[in-house]
Amino acid sequence: MKTEEGQPEVTALQSFVGRSGSPQMGRDPVNAVMVRHWRAAMGEEENDASTEVSIAPPAMLQVWTMPEPGALVDRNDPITKLFDYLDAQGFTGIVATNSEHDYLLPVQIGDRITSIKTISEISDVKKTGLGLGHFITSNVVFMNQKGETVGSQMHRVLKYRPPEKPGPAAQRPRPNVTLDTVFFFEGAAQGKLLIQGCQGCGNLHHPPTAACRDCGSLDLAPVEMSGRGTLFTYTVVHAPVSPPFVAPYPVILVELEEGPRVVSELHGVASEDIRIGMELEVDFIDLPPDFGLPIFRARRSNDG
């Protein structure tokens, strides 16, 4: 049943608030191998195999109970039923909007983490850049094998109704641009890969910050990169998917030859041909009217 505005019946939708999903226990215990992989991907220096690992980084909290790609979905789970309900009303698109973590206890190597997600709020229908939609806020509690709460997460997603015939300009969402990041996208529109550089100590930072993370200097300026790098790591996205993306597609972490690492897209390479360490070069796509977005392709063999 729908209201005159085409939104789900308010009473039926709000009946999901306060309901919790099934407990999700991590398939594997917290382990040093995954912690080392995480630290390497994050660019942390504490990645020496000889260094004893006893505590997992707090930001890894939600990693331990993530479902595996292709895992069977419990259609009777309350959260799954909420998403199915909204899908039936035409709100088939989904995108994460924001998240906040609270870390309460250290997560030790060997811990078995379980998470429980509870729906805490569902907004009325809202008009967004992606279309009409509902913001769904959930609270996730993470517990160890002793039943102790080690942390919690506020997680909010937008379930929206995609346009029936999206125009070319509306197919790719524009980036969230701030005063700290505007130079990055304006540079890309000019065919330049710009990374923030500290004029005090000379170190490069990405993503950009308001002050140098190394010396604290506020004297920061864009520095043009060569655009060459190597594939440090990647993940393959299967869902959710919004136009113009077609699943499955890779999201990559490129290590530039100058040192910084950049999250980007890989174009022109078949999934079976993606290799860690492959040589890449930057390319650019336009985001009208005045922005660009750096993406990467396999480096041409004749490139010096």
Image (cartoon, grey):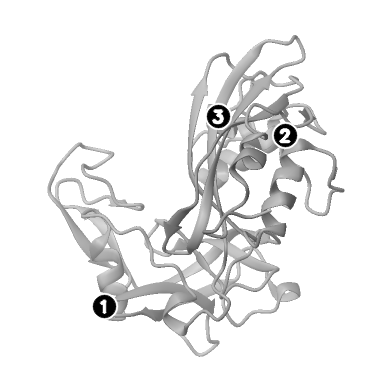
Q: Say whether residue 132 is left or right of residue 208.
A: right
Q: Badge 1, how many Cα within 10 Å: few under 14, some, many 20+?
A: few
Q: Badge 3, how many Cα within 10 Å: few under 14, some, many 20+?
A: some
Q: Distance of mark 2 from mark 3, alpha carbons?
A: 13 Å
> Label 3: which residue?
153
Amino acid type of the residue that numbered disc 3 sits on in the rendered structure? Gln
Expressed as whole percent of the image width and height from the top left, the position of residue 136 reads: 56, 42
Q: Distance of mark 1 from mark 2, alpha carbons?
A: 41 Å
Mark 2 element type:
helix
CB under 8 Å between discs 1 and 3: no
Residue 63 occupies which quadrant of the picture? top right
> What numbered label is drawn on residue 290?
1
Residue 11 occupies which quadrant of the picture? top right
In percent of the image, x 53 and y 69: which residue is there? 265
Expressed as whole percent of the image width and height from the top left, the position of residue 221 reads: 17, 58
The mark closer to the camera, 2 or 3, is: 3
> What numbered label is drawn on residue 250?
none
